[in-house]
Image (cartoon, rainbow, N blue to C red):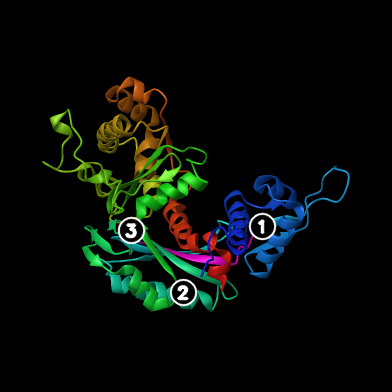
């Protein structure tokens, strides 16, 4: 149990957390840089680094050569073999990865599904995959927790999946099921919320404190919000469901789903159809659309979806006035075909004052964004209190 914040032990735990968080988020740091960043003295930083080394969470490396006079400062780095298991169940596949505390993916597997995966089956797949990996790819690693990025409404208080419509899950106790299957701490959250966190910390939104993230996946469109540097979940954790909004569609010929919501009109399934595919991961779909982009029916569908997406983005800009909008998944593919057209559609429909400073970017973490976000949720306990999580 963590002691009260004002006690010596409480201060010590916070300092360990601060040091571990810096090398996790910023990458390898010299002791000298850690001293400057934390405001602690050199001997305290050295002692904290030594303790984190003893806990098996960081390692020290030889200092980089410099021209400075005196002894160079050792470099402290998060260990690559401290792992979180990240899981993204979708309608066509379950993707599982082992993500290091250093932010790199050690091993990754996409398990194709010919039917909808159930919550129980998801737990069994995670357990079986982890058991197999522990005999091979990550045999010597320290797996500390599991994070799941779910395309649906996840209750923040207990990780209950209230509703994942495309998976046909309702009130699924996913966290409890996975914890029982593997015996490790488990975090569960909405996939787009985790994607927003990942892009904010490590990707296209790094250093930007007010952003909107929209994720396009096999289950539709979700979103995440960062306001003043903090994620916005709403009272139950359900904020950001942009895909369930009903965008205005000016041209009657653009509508494909009468009365439909955004994700009915701006749709990965429709993109797969025009590409002549039944299923594909993100890079494969992007490559297929790029190869077929000169075909009139492909170009027309891409343009139609961009027009409707532009309206949805303009609505978000009018309501939230963000500095940045990030698009991930098939939305990134859609944007990259003609980013200028999407920017113009947004600007034409948003209030000029709200839109004048907003930037539009695609996700920098690509298909890893949801897995990185799920791993970050899994690492949260360890980063908050290295002593408690390592005990």
Taking the spot 44% from the left edge, 54% from the top edge, the residue there is 373
Q: Quadrant of the C terminus?
A: bottom right
Circle 2 Cα neighbour tier, 10 Å, few/some/many (<14 / 14–19 / ≥20): many
Residue farthest to the top, as pictured: 352
**Where residue 254 is drawn, which disc sits there?**
none
Query: Which of pointers 3 and 2 indicates the residue nearer the eye?
Result: 3
Please tell me whether residue 218 is drawn above or below residue 345 in the rendered image: below
Quarter of the figure with residue 188: bottom left
Quarter of the figure with residue 386: bottom right
- The dominant secondary structure in magenta is strand
Closer to the chain start, of discs 1 and 3, is 1
SS class of the residue under badge 1? Answer: strand
Closer to the chain start, of discs 3 and 2, is 2
Closer to the chain start, of discs 1 and 2, is 1
Residue on which disc 2 sits: 130
In front: 153, or 120?
A: 153
Residue on which disc 1 sits: 77
Quarter of the figure with residue 344: top left
SS class of the residue under badge 3? Answer: loop
Residue on which disc 3 sits: 156
- Horizontally, residue 136 falls left or right of residue 319, namely right
Q: How many discs mark residues in the rendered view?
A: 3
Q: CA distance from mark 3 to mark 2?
A: 25 Å
Q: CA distance from mark 1 to mark 3?
A: 31 Å
Q: Specify the segment rendered in magenta.
A: 77-88
Q: Magenta includes 79?
A: yes
């Amino acid at each position: 149990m963590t002691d009260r914040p004002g006690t010596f032990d409480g201060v010590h735990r916070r300092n360990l957390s601060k040091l571990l968080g810096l090398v996790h988020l910023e990458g390898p740091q010299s002791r000298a840089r850690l001293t400057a960043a934390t405001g602690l003295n050199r001997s305290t930083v050295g002692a904290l680094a030594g303790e984190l080394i003893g806990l098996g969470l960081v390692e020290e490396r030889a200092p980089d050569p410099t021209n400075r006079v005196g002894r160079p400062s050792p470099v402290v780095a998060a260990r690559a073999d401290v792992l979180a298991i990240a899981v993204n169940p979708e309608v066509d596949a379950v993707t599982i990865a082992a993500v290091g505390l250093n932010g790199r993916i050690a091993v990754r597997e996409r398990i194709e599904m010919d039917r909808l995966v159930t919550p129980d089956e998801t737990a069994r797949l995670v357990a079986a995959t982890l058991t197999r990996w522990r005999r091979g790819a990550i045999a010597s690693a320290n797996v500390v927790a599991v994070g799941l990025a779910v395309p649906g409404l996840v209750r923040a208080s207990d990780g209950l999946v209230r509703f994942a419509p495309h998976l046909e899950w309702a009130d699924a106790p996913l966290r409890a099921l996975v914890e029982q299957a593997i015996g490790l701490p488990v975090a569960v959250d909405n996939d787009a919320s985790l994607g927003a966190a990942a892009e904010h910390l490590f990707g296209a939104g790094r250093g930007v404190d007010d952003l909107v993230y929209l994720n396009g996946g096999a289950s539709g469109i979700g979103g995440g919000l960062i306001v003043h540097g903090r994620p916005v979940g709403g009272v139950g954790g359900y904020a950001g469901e942009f895909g369930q909004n009903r965008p205005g569609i000016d041209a009657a010929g653009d509508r494909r789903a009468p009365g439909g919501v955004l994700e009915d009109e701006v749709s990965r399934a429709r993109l797969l159809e025009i590409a002549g595919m039944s299923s594909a991961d993100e890079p494969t779909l992007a490559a297929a659309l790029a190869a077929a982009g000169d075909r009139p029916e492909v170009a027309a569908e891409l343009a139609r979806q961009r027009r409707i997406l532009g309206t949805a983005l303009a609505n978000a800009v009018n309501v939230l006035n963000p500095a940045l909008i990030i698009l991930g998944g098939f939305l990134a593919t859609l944007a990259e075909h003609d980013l200028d057209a999407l920017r113009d559609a947004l600007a034409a429909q948003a209030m000029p004052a709200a839109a004048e400073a907003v930037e539009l970017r695609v996700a920098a973490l690509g298909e890893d964004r949801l897995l990185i976000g799920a791993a970050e949720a899994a690492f949260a306990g360890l980063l908050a209190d290295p002593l408690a999580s390592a005990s």
